[in-house]
Amino acid sequence: MHMADALLAPAVAGVMYVASGSAAGVSIHELKKDAKDIKLPVMGVMAAFVFAGQMINYTIPGTGSSGHLCGGLMLSALLGPYAGFLSMIVVLTIQCLFFADGGLMALGANVWNMAFYGCFIGYFLIYRPIMKAKWGNTRIRLIVASILGCLLTLQLGAFSVCLETYASGISELSFGAFAALMQPIHLAIGLVEGLITAAVLVFVYQTRPELLEVVGENETKVNWSAKRVILVIAIAALLVGGIGSQFASSHPDGLEWALFGNEDAGYNANMGLDEEDYGKSSNVSQAAESVQEKTAFLPDYAFAGNEDNPVGTTVSGIVGSAIVAGVAVGICYLGGFFRKKKQTT
Amino acid sequence: MDELSRLDSFYHRLHPLVKLLLTIAYIAVVLSFPVRSLAGLFPMLLFPLIGYALSGIPVRTCFYRLRYILPLVAFVGIWNPILNRTPVMTLGALTISAGMISFITLLLKGIYALMASFLLIATTGIENICYALRCLHIPKLLVTTLLITYRYISLLLSEAGTMASSYALRAPNQKGVHYKAWGSFLGSLLLRSMDRATALYQSMQMRGFSGDFYYTKGTRMQTPDVLFFVLGLGLILLVRFVPIATLIGQLFV
């Protein structure tokens, strides 16, 4: 689910950085408030453990394939949601920097998609309520909580990937079609992840139950004042507004298609459009041009099929690019040349 | 990777903060190019190449890592040429569609961003990056955890590797870990890691660890660093707003 840089527009990447950064700020604040001594090394080593865990392949019974771990919910169950979230940020940062898994600009989005949902939504909405409940025994509750938590968080994460890609205006694929591809895959991945998490947590519970973050006992009660709730809702509204405005501005194609698709037979109908149909859809959306003109900041949108565009510009663009390519080769050569020189001296 | 970051070159010696900021600015500018602005995007290639040439790191070392990234980017972008066939131009018998252009633009963005971030890591190293992050006032808690995690990854990876190979030796002809052993396999690694972490924490506390790491060298920004930053940023913005390739082409066509 790691997003590469190329899949995001800077504005969307920035919004996601702000969102994840705020969550990290709250986590650090909560950790400092709660614990007298923050066990930094424990967080560090557990983050490293997630790496090791991801390396191992798990055979999925009945199929030929294998799955692997993502770790958000597991870290939250072991370290608590705040420390778990920070550890996941560290995991994703190192993956991005040293393993080229996910981009530097996309880090904010990746933290949100993979760490935020697992550590906060999965923990607070599913894991904690289930672990606090009185039914069944702890073992069964652990299994149910892990599976449900992972299923939900991976679905949310995959949905966010679709939303962010669509808001960035990268793919010609309609939002509905992209989501229809992503969600079922991540249902399966979430199930496997949930099963692995459940297996590990049950093992830890049976051998060293004291390691699991105690839920419900000695818990500091959080007082949710009206002011705080309003603040949270306001931030959420700002984020949604920020992302939502991107829909209108950065992806005119998506807008066209949404208009066309809604009129016709829903989003999925867009997938099979052929050339003539696409042309038609362009005409339909031109009716909404006045809206687009106000919001579009892509200067090159008129590029496609624009008769006014002098061919000379395009040709000179290619010629210029070829010359730049020549310069690039020259730089490579020079770099290589200097390197050899260094090695020999 | 750590070996690469220990080389000595002009680019290696630059202040880590300069490299971090320039890399972020570069990637942001690359991503800000419109979906079909291929000619505008292309000259951005020069920046990472100059960086690689200055640092003496061969460009091909970074392309080895693209094998994981490009398939995902391609998966998202591959629909563009199929769905958007509006012809933009023809080269002989070949008709180039808008979708094809946007697909190539997308791939180029992916490649550029990776080239830049690889260059940053390969010339800076984790300690200096953490130092740069501290300069940007990223919380100590996060940066220190990052550093500790990085130091322990190789240890835990080799431990997991040992466990995996001993498991594989006892379970021949079996692909991966059997589902009955999922819990106990990863669980025992987890318990060992936890014990190790606790021991580590206690020993660090015994030696007076108060949450502060002291980074390699608290180098101050020198004039060449500032100059390089200003020049680099200026050039990046120039290429963003002036269609260099088209202008050069117009000289000849």
Image (cartoon, coloured by chain):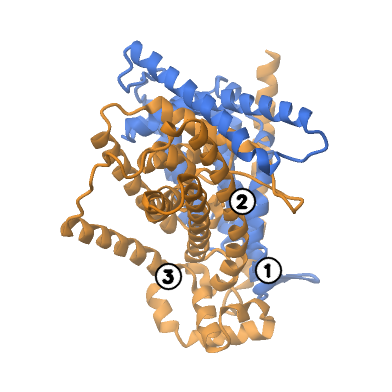
Chain colours: A orange, B blue
Say above or below: A128 vs B190: below
**Residue sitting at x 51%, y 31%:** A207
How far apart are the two marked residues, 2 and 1, measured between alpha carbons? 34 Å
Q: Residue furthest top?
A: B207
Mark 2 or 1: in front is 2
**Residue sitting at x 25%, y 28%:** A36
Mark 3 or 2: in front is 2
Task: Tell whether label 1 touches label 2 (CB within 8 Å).
Answer: no
Badge 3 and badge 2 both on one subunit: yes
Q: Chain of mark 2?
A: A
Q: Amino acid at mark 1?
A: Pro
What is the crowding at mark 3: few (fewer than 14 residues within 10 Å), some, or many (at least 20)?
many
**Residue sitting at x 45%, y 50%:** A118
**Residue sitting at x 74%, y 53%:** A62
Please tell me which residue lies in front, A317 or A105: A105
Badge 2 and badge 1 both on one subunit: no
Please tell me which residue lies in front, A254 or B39: A254
Res B85 → quadrant: bottom right
How far apart are the two marked residues, 3 and 1, measured between alpha carbons? 22 Å
What is the crowding at mark 2: few (fewer than 14 residues within 10 Å), some, or many (at least 20)?
many
Q: Chain of mark 3?
A: A
Percent of width and height locating residue A76: 42, 42
Evaluate whether residue B14 shows in this view: no
What residue is shown with label 1? B81
What residue is shown with label 3? A249
Q: Secondary structure at mark 3?
A: helix
Percent of width and height locating residue A135: 42, 54
Q: Amino acid at mark 3?
A: Ser
Evaluate whether residue A331 shows in this view: yes
What residue is shown with label 2? A192
What is the crowding at mark 1: few (fewer than 14 residues within 10 Å), some, or many (at least 20)?
some
Percent of width and height locating residue A197: 54, 44
